[in-house]
């Protein structure tokens, strides 16, 4: 449920007028011939910037849906101490408000990396043809192109100043299938599946597939994350140890490539492009407008286990960490259990676990040995929050009406008048909304480390002396069913995930810290100090992992050797696919395939 708890101390619970002034003020000169200098994308002040007449033609092509982009925090930048600013800062605590703002991103930025910055203008796509028009316009006019669905990118890939934004929010169609066969795959056995437009958020997908249809689709844990970005990065959710990676369930995608063609990619048609979309990175190979994912049988029960244990000394804490890891390997290292254990510098072990397909009695029995261990050493440990276990009907896990009645604190609802009832988010994700990242590291930890349990425990403990260490067990596929591992093997995600029992995340940030907003600026000194501590803590863990690898959707902006870290031996094939479908690098994202050939801002080719 609390998919990405990176904020320290965060709560955790299982139309333009015909010629807008925006365009009218721009240079009207005839475009000049391209020089022999390195390829460079144009900015509004450049003589080659499109004329108002060219923008007007694009506006006509997309049915008038070419809109200006402003920062949702404009009221605060214009009048920092005003009532309008105060109201807007309150709005920014609502992920669905941010999602409805064309210039909004779910994070405010990252220290010394990026800040949320509005594009020049946006095409508010309502059909594939709108995307085609935007892609053709950006390519023909040498514009920086940005694609935004959910806007949740940690690395800031869904925003860029002086760019043309393709906004896919309105591509929201959902279709549940009983017998889906990918296009061009005659003879392939039909599958139960769901087709999701690029603007669909995961809570909407779960509502259609699980709450209403009684099946399961593997997506993300955070309700307001967009479907495309998650899947194209690989995709993990609370129950991925049971159902596998989201990308491994992809059956087909419609994608607009750099040449302006809307292609259908699947295992039979454009199979290399299809493979690349299953974890090769969002916004890299084209603009995905629709995805079809296989659905799975839904277990009778989902559930959770939570608790908080405090050790009374460092020695006792090291013992606690070691015992928990041994307990995890013996009792929880299987397809049933996922989510997190948090090992903190304050000598606390926080547990926020979920499980699938177990009864209450089975889940209670699994935890009894660890409870007995804690209770048996009252001089060393205190159960600050006793370990509690509970189940519920799996069909009601994302049922917001049921949740409001039975678990009212688990979800928050969009407070805006007239907001759809499905605009919800887990309470434990609230700290991430409009947050500013200080530092972030992730690392796949191989299950082979269990062969030397003392060394593993020492490593995790030593890391926690520097910073909070989060063990995301659902984000490593070791212990998953053989079918889930085999399906993940046919994706470009670093094969290290197949042997990882957990993804370690060490990270922090500040809630509602916004660059350029007086009185709400990030504390740069603290952010840099935190980032340094996070680096040191992660180095403790890297020391025991021979081939360090990371998860592209949740990783360091400054990831060293990201090509190998994210994709391992799959990177060369991805690079070849990129050259075939996007030879001129129209689709640039930070730390994406081919990004090393461009300047940091994506405007000038350097390679």
Image: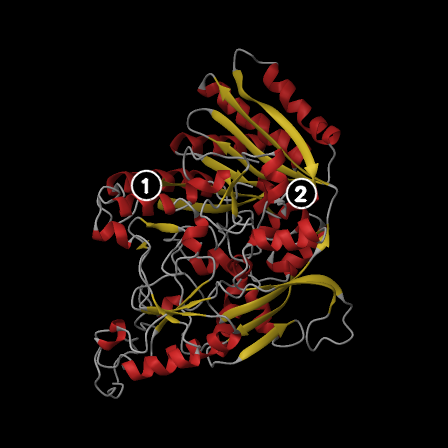
| Residue placed furthest toward the top | 379
Q: Is residue 309 above or below residue 206?
A: above
Residue 474 spot, x, y in % from top left: 59, 44
Q: Is residue 139 among the parts visible in the rendering?
A: no
Residue 299 falls in image quadrant = top right
Within 10 angstroms of label 1, few (less than 14), some, or many (20 or more) residues? some
Q: Which residue is label 1 attached to?
A: 532
Of marks 1 and 2, the one in the foreground: 2
Which quarter of the rendering shows the C terminus? bottom left
Residue 440 vs residue 135, the one in the foreground: 135
Residue 37 spot, x, y in % from top left: 25, 81
Q: How is the image coloured?
A: secondary structure
Q: What number of labels is visible?
A: 2
Residue 270 vs residue 139, the one in the foreground: 139
Within 10 angstroms of label 2, few (less than 14), some, or many (20 or more) residues? some
**Mark toward the start of the polypeptide (1 vs 2):** 2
Q: Which residue is label 2 attached to?
A: 396
Secondary structure under tag 2 reads helix
Do the CB atoms of the residues marked 1 and 2 lie less than 8 Å apart? no
Between marks 1 and 2, how big is the CA–CA gap? Answer: 42 Å
Residue 446 spot, x, y in % from top left: 57, 44
Decide if residue 155 is on the left or right side of residue 396: left
Residue 452 spot, x, y in % from top left: 58, 34
Residue drawn at x 59%, y 68% as measured from the top left: 275
Decide if residue 486 is on the left or right side of residue 571: right
Residue 457 vs residue 148, the one in the foreground: 148
Q: Is residue 278 above or below residue 268?
A: above
Q: Is residue 518 among the parts visible in the rendering?
A: yes
Which quarter of the rendering shows the N terminus? top right
Decide if residue 284 is on the left or right side of residue 202: left
Residue drawn at x 61%, y 39% as measured from the top left: 403
């Amino acid at each position: 449920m609390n998919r990405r708890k990176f904020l320290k101390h965060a709560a955790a619970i299982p139309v333009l007028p015909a010629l807008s002034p925006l365009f009218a003020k721009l240079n009207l000169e005839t475009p000049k011939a391209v020089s022999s200098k390195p390829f460079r994308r144009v900015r509004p002040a450049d003589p080659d910037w499109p004329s108002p007449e060219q923008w007007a033609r694009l506006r006509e092509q997309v049915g008038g849906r070419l809109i200006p982009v402003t920062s949702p925090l404009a009221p605060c930048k214009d009048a920092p101490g005003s009532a309008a600013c105060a109201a807007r800062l309150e709005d920014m605590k609502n992920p669905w408000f941010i999602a409805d703002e064309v210039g909004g991103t779910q994070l405010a930025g990252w220290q010394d990396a990026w800040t949320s910055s509005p594009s020049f203008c946006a095409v508010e796509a309502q059909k594939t043809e709108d995307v085609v028009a935007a892609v053709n316009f950006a390519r023909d006019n040498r514009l920086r192109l940005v694609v935004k669905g959910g806007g949740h990118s940690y690395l800031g890939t869904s925003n860029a100043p002086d760019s043309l934004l393709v906004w896919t929010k309105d591509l929201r169609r959902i279709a549940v299938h009983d017998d889906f066969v990918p296009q061009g795959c005659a003879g392939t056995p039909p599958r139960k599946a769901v087709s999701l437009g690029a603007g669909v958020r995961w809570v909407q997908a779960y509502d259609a597939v699980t709450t209403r249809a009684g099946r399961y689709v593997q997506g993300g844990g955070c309700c307001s994350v967009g479907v495309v970005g998650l899947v194209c990065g690989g995709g993990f959710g609370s129950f991925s140890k049971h159902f596998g990676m989201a990308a491994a369930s992809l059956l087909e995608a419609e994608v607009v490539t750099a040449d302006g063609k809307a292609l259908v990619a699947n295992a039979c048609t454009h199979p290399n492009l299809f493979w690349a979309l299953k974890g090769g990175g969002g916004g890299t190979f084209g603009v995905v407008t629709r995805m079809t994912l296989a659905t799975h049988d839904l277990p009778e029960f989902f559930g959770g286990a939570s608790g908080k244990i405090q050790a009374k000394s460092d020695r006792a804490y090291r013992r606690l960490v070691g015992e928990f890891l041994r307990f995890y390997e013996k009792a929880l290292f299987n397809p049933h259990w996922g989510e997190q254990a948090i090992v903190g510098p304050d000598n606390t072990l926080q547990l926020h676990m979920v499980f699938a397909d177990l009864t209450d009695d089975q889940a209670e029995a699994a935890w009894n040995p660890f409870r007995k261990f804690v209770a048996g050493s009252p001089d060393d440990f205190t159960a600050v929050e006793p370990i509690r276990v509970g189940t519920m009907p799996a069909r009601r896990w994302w049922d917001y009406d049921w949740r409001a009645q039975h678990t009212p604190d688990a979800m928050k609802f969009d407070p805006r008048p007239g907001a759809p009832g499905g605009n919800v988010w887990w309470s434990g994700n609230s700290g991430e909304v409009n947050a500013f990242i200080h530092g972030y590291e992730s690392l796949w930890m191989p299950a082979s480390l269990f062969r030397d349990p003392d060394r593993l425990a020492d490593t995790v403990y030593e890391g926690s002396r520097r910073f909070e260490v989060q063990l995301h067990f659902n984000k490593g596929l070791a212990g998953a069913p053989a079918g889930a591992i085999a399906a993940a093997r046919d994706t470009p995600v670093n094969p290290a995930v197949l042997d990882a029992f957990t993804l370690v995340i060490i990270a922090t940030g500040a809630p509602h810290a916004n660059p350029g907003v007086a009185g709400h600026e990030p504390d740069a000194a603290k952010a840099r100090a935190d980032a340094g501590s996070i680096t040191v803590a992660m180095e403790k863990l890297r020391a025991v992992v021979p081939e360090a690898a990371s998860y592209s959707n949740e990783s360091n902006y400054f990831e060293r050797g990201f090509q190998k870290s994210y994709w391992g031996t799959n990177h060369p094939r991805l690079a070849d696919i990129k050259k075939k479908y996007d030879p001129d690098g129209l689709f640039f994202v930070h730390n994406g395939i081919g990004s090393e050939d461009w300047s940091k801002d994506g405007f000038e080719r350097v390679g």
